[in-house]
Image: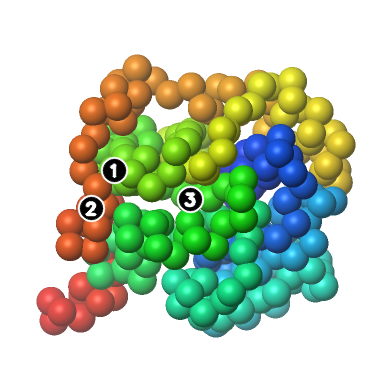
């Protein structure tokens, strides 16, 4: 249950917004090693190439072998699977992308990728790799009434320093036992109506969504008053020297404490 809700909100909002201006063809996924984000992207008829860059070879190999639901996606010739640090891979490549997706691990102290939520990364690595009209989306941690100030609000504010248009949205993920947040960002307007979203899904997607339609996204992008006010007044900008973390510690932190 958790995965199809999470995957829909990671993928479909950004793809449907792109279709307002052009048909997205090239997409770069940071993380997403289990293949679910790639699977949903490859359902879209306009997509010609998906680069999935994950740092964990063991996770990718395990999921390729045992996650039957994603087996077809891993075999799709449009998928370019890369094992590398996403930042290094984006900086190495010269091509531009219509969509870049951050399907990343949470920003935890000592974790593998909290640097991929920083202003410098968004400004100097992500933005220069987007085509004109392109959109970036990232998962942004817990977004509940009591949890959204951990990282969701400051990731939102950080993206506002880099992109002209930034849209936060959220949904309840049962296995997370909380509301979870995502943020879209672009230098082109992000403007969806529920009717347009439904029409684009019908025209562009193979099969039917189990959870997401236009009305569902309208609800997801209408945050509670408390969360909206926090986002409006948030001043923290996420940097490597001034990072915020959600609960928990990564292996690097644990090694330093040993």
The residue carrying pointer 2 sits among few (fewer than 14), some (14 to 19) or many (20 or more) residues within 10 Å by Cα, namely many
- Regarding mark 2 in the picture, which secondary structure is present there? loop
- Regarding mark 1 in the picture, which secondary structure is present there? helix
From the top left corner, tell me how far across and down residue 61 is, in percent: 62, 80
Q: Residue furthest front?
A: 132
From the top left corner, tell me how far across and down residue 157 is, in percent: 32, 40
Residue at point 35%, 17% (across, down) = 225
Instruction: Estimate the spatial distance between the alpha carbons at disc 1 and disc 3, rounded to whole Å.
Output: 13 Å
Q: Horizontal placement of 57 versus 183: left or right?
A: right
Instruction: Estimate the spatial distance between the alpha carbons at disc 1 and disc 2, rounded to whole Å.
Output: 8 Å
Q: Is residue 256 above or below residue 209?
A: below
Instruction: Estimate the spatial distance between the alpha carbons at disc 3 and disc 2, rounded to whole Å.
Output: 16 Å
As drawn, the label of residue 210 is: none
Q: Horizontal placement of 232 versus 9: left or right?
A: left
Residue 8 seen in this snapshot: no
As drawn, the label of residue 138 is: 3
Q: Earlier in the sequence, mark 1 or mark 3?
A: 3
The residue carrying pointer 1 sits among few (fewer than 14), some (14 to 19) or many (20 or more) residues within 10 Å by Cα, namely many
Viewer-proximal residue among 228 and 186: 186
- Regarding mark 3 in the picture, which secondary structure is present there? strand
Q: Is residue 222 above or below residue 42?
A: above
Residue at point 32%, 55% (across, down) = 119
Which quadrant does the C terminus fall into?
A: bottom left
Q: Residue furthest left?
A: 257
Which quadrant does the N terminus fall into?
A: top right
Residue 164 seen in this snapshot: yes
Q: Is residue 60 above or below residue 225?
A: below
As drawn, the label of residue 244 is: 2
**Residue at numbered disc 1:** 154
Residue at point 68%, 42% (across, down) = 18
């Amino acid at each position: 249950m958790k995965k199809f809700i999470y995957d829909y909100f990671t993928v479909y909002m950004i793809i449907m917004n792109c279709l307002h201006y052009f048909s997205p063809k090239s997409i770069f996924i940071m993380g997403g090693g289990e293949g679910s984000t790639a699977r949903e992207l490859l359902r879209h008829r306009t997509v010609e190439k998906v680069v999935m860059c994950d740092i964990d070879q063991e996770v990718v190999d395990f999921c390729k072998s045992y996650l039957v639901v994603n087996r077809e996606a891993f075999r799709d010739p449009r998928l370019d699977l890369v094992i590398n640090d996403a930042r290094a891979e984006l900086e190495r490549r010269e091509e531009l992308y219509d969509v870049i997706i951050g399907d990343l691990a949470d920003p935890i102290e000592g974790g593998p990728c909290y640097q991929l939520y920083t202003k410098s990364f968004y400004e100097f690595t992500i933005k220069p790799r987007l085509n004109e009209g392109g959109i970036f989306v990232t998962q942004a941690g817990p977004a509940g009434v009591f949890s959204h100030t951990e990282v969701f609000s400051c990731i939102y504010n950080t993206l506002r320093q880099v992109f002209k248009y930034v849209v936060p949205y959220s949904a309840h993920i049962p296995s997370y036992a909380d509301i979870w947040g995502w943020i879209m960002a672009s230098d082109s307007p992000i403007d969806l109506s529920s009717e347009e979203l439904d029409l684009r899904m019908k025209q562009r997607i193979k099969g039917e969504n189990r959870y997401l339609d236009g009305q569902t996204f309208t609800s997801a992008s209408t945050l509670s008053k408390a969360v909206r006010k926090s986002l409006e007044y948030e001043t923290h900008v996420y940097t490597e020297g001034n990072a915020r973390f959600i609960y928990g510690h990564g292996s690097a932190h644990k090694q330093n404490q040993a």
